[in-house]
Image (cartoon, grey):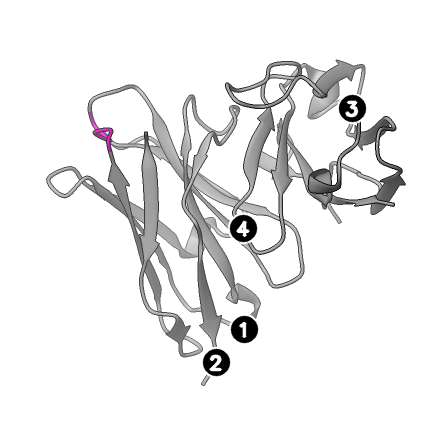
């Protein structure tokens, strides 16, 4: 059964870079033609798509975040990562990683449990 | 303000049928892009409920069904159960925003 697990600091200072890693189990992120993605949810609010990407480089980001988002893949560790620069309080949210089989037009079928990141001094 | 509009809340008694609407426009649902639905129980990650408008992943009860018509989509839940009390989100693709979008969510209360 495919499993995803987010990890990273739970507290980030304003203006610093928010960095998270997603570890994937049971499926190699490079062995199938799947996309992977990040979604976030501010406390008490709805879901926001951050971006979707293929392990070999194709990326698609939310235009509202694109200038601050970077994603990367480490196939040797079966992990992918998110970096969000110049963090502000508005970036405080639960961050989820998920499988996005066919890219941003498709569903997110497997999700991590989520990790809360608070941006505060 | 999301480009996909959902009612903030719906409610129903156990055993009843409820529907949750997701209204879009010609740049998303109306353009033919698929709609997907998620259930989010309190304190947990969203769970895929319906994908590509009408399809249920393995393990999702057939009490849940989806449909799409024109610029809207709907999620129907029959035989309401107390465990169905959750937030429900629709998702699609929007050409104007050039990305995936979620509705703001609908809170289902089982009376």
C-alpha span from label 2 to label 3: 39 Å
C-alpha span from label 1 to label 4: 23 Å
Kindly identify which numbered label has been placed on residue A120: 2
Which mark sits nearer the N-terminus, 3 or 4? Answer: 4
Q: Which residues are magenta?
A: A26-30
Q: Are the two marked residues, 1 and 4, in contact with CB atoms closer than 8 angstroms?
A: no
Q: Is A118 left, or right, of B39 in this rendering?
A: left
Rendered location of residue B45, percent (x, y): 52, 47
- Picture quadrant where residue A24 is located: top left
C-alpha span from label 1 to label 3: 34 Å
Q: Nearer the viewer, mark 1 or mark 3?
A: 3
Farthest left residue?
A: A76
Dot 3 alpha-carbon crowd within 10 angstroms: few under 14, some 14 to 19, many 20 or more: many
Q: Nearer the viewer, residue A95 or B98?
A: A95
Q: Which residue is mark 1?
A: A89
Q: Which residue sits at x=71%, y=22%?
A: B29
Kind of element beneath mark 1:
helix
Q: Identify whether A119 is placed above or below A113.
A: below
Rendered location of residue A95, percent (x, y): 46, 55
C-alpha span from label 2 to label 4: 24 Å
Kindly identify which numbered label has been placed on residue B44: 4
Q: Identify whether B57 is placed above or below A6.
A: above
Q: Nearer the viewer, residue B32 or A21?
A: A21
Q: Which residue is mark 3?
A: B74
Dot 4 alpha-carbon crowd within 10 angstroms: few under 14, some 14 to 19, many 20 or more: few
Q: Is B32 left, or right, of A20 in this rendering?
A: right
Dot 1 alpha-carbon crowd within 10 angstroms: few under 14, some 14 to 19, many 20 or more: some
On the same chain: label 3 and label 4? yes
């Amino acid at each position: 059964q495919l499993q995803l697990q987010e990890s990273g600091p739970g507290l980030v200072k304003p203006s610093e870079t928010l960095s998270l890693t997603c570890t994937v189990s049971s499926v190699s992120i490079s062995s199938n033609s799947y996309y992977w993605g990040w979604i976030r949810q501010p406390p008490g609010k709805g879901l926001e798509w951050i971006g979707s990407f293929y392990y070999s480089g194709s990326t698609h980001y939310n235009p509202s975040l694109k200038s601050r988002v970077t994603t990367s893949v480490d196939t040797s560790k079966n992990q992918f990562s998110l970096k969000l620069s110049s963090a502000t309080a508005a970036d405080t949210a639960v961050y989820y990683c998920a499988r996005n089989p066919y890219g941003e037009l498709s569903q997110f079928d497997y999700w991590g449990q989520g990790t809360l990141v608070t941006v505060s001094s | 303000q999301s480009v996909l509009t959902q009612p903030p809340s719906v409610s129903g008694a156990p055993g009843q049928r409820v529907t949750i609407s997701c209204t879009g426009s010609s740049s998303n649902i109306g353009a033919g892009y698929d709609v997907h639905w998620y259930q989010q129980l309190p304190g947990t990650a969203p769970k895929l409920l319906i994908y590509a408008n009408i399809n249920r992943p393995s393990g999702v009860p057939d009490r849940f069904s989806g449909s799409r018509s024109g610029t809207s989509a709907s999620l129907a839940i029959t035989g309401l159960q107390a465990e169905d009390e959750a937030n429900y989100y629709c998702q699609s693709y929007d050409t104007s925003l050039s990305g995936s979008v979620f509705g703001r969510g609908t809170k289902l209360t089982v009376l």
